[in-house]
Structures are given as structure tokens and as C-alpha cells.
Amino acid sequence: MEGLQPHPHLKDLFIQGYGAMEFPSWMMNDGLHSLLPNLINIQILECMSCKILPPFSQLPSLKSLELEDMKEVVELKDGEGSSATPIVLFPSLELLRLSRLSKLKELWRMEGPSFSQLSKLNICDFWNLESLQLHSSPYLSELNIKNCRNLASLELPLSHGLSELRIIDCPILESVNVASFTSLEKLTLRGVRAEVLRHLIFVSASSSLKSLHICQIDGMIADPEEEPEVPLRYVSTLETLYIWKCSGLTTLLHWMGNLSSLTFLLIYHCPELTSLPQQIFSLQKLQTLYLCDYGYPHLNKKYNKETGEDRAKIAHIPHVRFYLDYLTRWKLEKPFK
């Protein structure tokens, strides 16, 4: 690739399976921004031996950057600046998708005026990433963090536009520093600590949260006799609630009655949950209820139409299901993937 320096009017760059340890010198040049001033989209896949990425952060027109399957990368080059005139990183970037950069320990510095146009950020399979700090990104609307198993701390900016947040399989994440969400509509959490769940719901209380998906979170309610603060009681805008494979969940407490806008409730394979609270009767907007407890048919026995002793609690709900067929389960699992 050394002799393939492209024309300065190039708009799209796609590289797959480049086998060398270093990218060509024209890509590693700190003057890359002047060589490719019109480049808009970059996609680099399966460059398994490369260790240092070029200074893409300088490119003035770059709107989309996708990096995937680059297991040897240890450094993201961001060019040279001075203390008087620090470099503004990614001035036009709107989409950043990073996946399976397993040795990388830190990202570009996301501070100051950098990343000022970023709207979607996806980070997946960063096994050595221990902390993530996102500073002011006024247009950030969607943030996805998945399978970062050493991620211990997360700092999020006050983003008035953030509408969707997904955190999947970050088991040791314990510190989430965020003041509040004002526009969050969809929150999906799988494989995180219960404390993270409680904190994120608490800071979402002032937003218009409409959809909450919870999966594989133990200890949501550790002891029903000593009920912890459940911020969900304040989220009256919630319309969709998934509770999926949460062991240790023995009861849904009286705050269920505060979810006055709820139209869809799914409870899937929570084996220790044996009953629903009386307050579910007050959810007059609830249209669809799934109670799927395969192998532990407590809920089925209590609420089935023919012989269920507590069927009256849910008689006002038009659509009640106790089983998921394969296609329906696949559709409902999509938010957690």
C-alpha cells in the first residue's frame, strides 16, 4: 500500500485484511489532514498485525469511522499539537464504531472542543479498557458499550440529546459519573451490577424514559423485607419494561403501581419470582403481559386463565402470554445483543 497514496478528493476509504505491522507512511503522516481533506468515511477491518493507527482524528471532513478486529492495536495516534494551539480531534465526526481492539487500554482524549459533532458511539469487545471518559458531545444521541469486561469506571457528559444508552456485559463496572439525563428514552442494561442499574434509573427520573430493558442483573431487590430505594417508582413515563433472566428477584414491589404509562411488560425466566404485586391491577394502560418462567411454573399456575387463583389481578390486560415461540423470543432478545 506504500505506493497507493490516494487522490486528495477521495471520500471513502475501505481496508480489509491488511497484513503488515505498520500502515504506509502516507497514512501515518501528521499532515494526513492536508493529504485527504475530503475524506468522509473510513472502514478498516481485520488488520490483525497493525499496532498503531494513523492520525484519523485530524481529518477535517471525516463523518464516519469504523474500526473492527484489530487485536494488536495498542495506540491511537492523534497528531502533534502545541500547548498554545491544541489539536481539535474529529471536528466533523458523527459516527464512531470500535469493535474488538482487545489490547487497547485507552481511547483518544475526548475533551474540549473535540468530538463536537459526535452523535453515535459504539464500543465493543475492549478487554483491556479500564475507564472511559466522554466529555462534552452536545449532539450525542446514542451510546452503546458492550463486552468491556475490565471497565470499572464510566464518565458521561451532560448531553441534552442522549436518547439511547446500552451497557452490555460490563460486570465490574461500579462507578458511573453522570449528573442527569434530560432526554433519555431507552435504557438497556445486561450483565452489570445492580448498583449501576439503580443509579442510572435515578439519574433518568427527570427524563422521558419510555423503554427499560433489564437482563441478567442479580440483586435488583435483595430483600423484600428491607426494600431499597427503587428509583423506578418515579419514572411515570415508562411504556415498555423487560425483566429478563434476573435471578434473586423474588418480588416486584408496590412501586409497580406508579408506572401509569406502562403498556408492555415482559418477565422472562426469573425463577424466584412467585407472584405479582396487587398494584398491577392499577396499570390500566397495560396491554401486553408476558410471564414466562420455564421450568419454574409459579406464575403460570397463579395467573393462567383456567385455574389461576390470582387471575383476577391481571384480568384487565387484553394480551397475556405464558410462552414465547422461537421467532418472538428472537425479536424480544434483540435489544440485549
Image (cartoon, grey):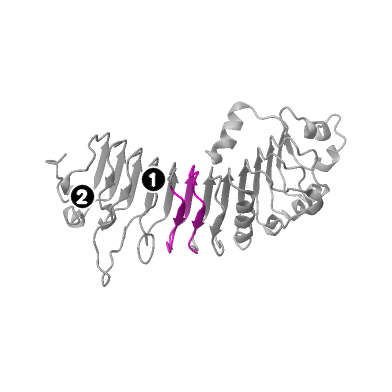
Q: Is residue 210 visible?
A: no
Disc nearest the viewer among 2 and 1: 2
Which label sits on residue 248? none
Q: Position of residue 7 (x, y in %)?
A: 14, 47
The residue segment tinted magenta is 129-158
Residue marked by disc 2 = 28
User: What's the amino acid at mark 1?
Assistant: Leu
Q: Quadrant of residue 207?
A: bottom right
Quarter placement of the N terminus: top left
Height in image: 164 above or below 112? above
Three-letter code, disc 2: Met
Q: Position of residue 68 (x, y in %)?
A: 36, 40
- Circle 1 sits on which residue? 98
- Left-right relation of 271 to 332: right
The quarter holding residue 90 reads bottom left
Whether residue 7 sits left or right of residue 292 in the image: it is left
Magenta segment, prevailing SS (helix, strand or loop): loop
The residues tagged by marks 2 and 1 sit, at their Cα atoms, a distance apart of 19 Å
Q: Secondary structure at mark 1?
A: strand
Q: Is residue 58 magenta?
A: no
Q: Position of residue 220 (x, y in %)?
A: 69, 48
For residue 154: magenta? yes
Q: Is 1 or 84 nearer to us in this picture? A: 84
**Which residue is at 50% across, 63% downward?**
160
Q: Answer whether residue 28 is visible to the viewer in this image.
A: yes
Tag 2: Cα neighbours inside 10 Å, few (<14), some, or many (≥20)? some
Q: Name the secondary structure under disc 2.
A: helix
Say whether residue 231 is left or right of residue 44.
right
Mark 1 burial class by Cα count in 10 Å: few <14, some 14-19, many 20+: some
Image point (39%, 49%), residue name: 105
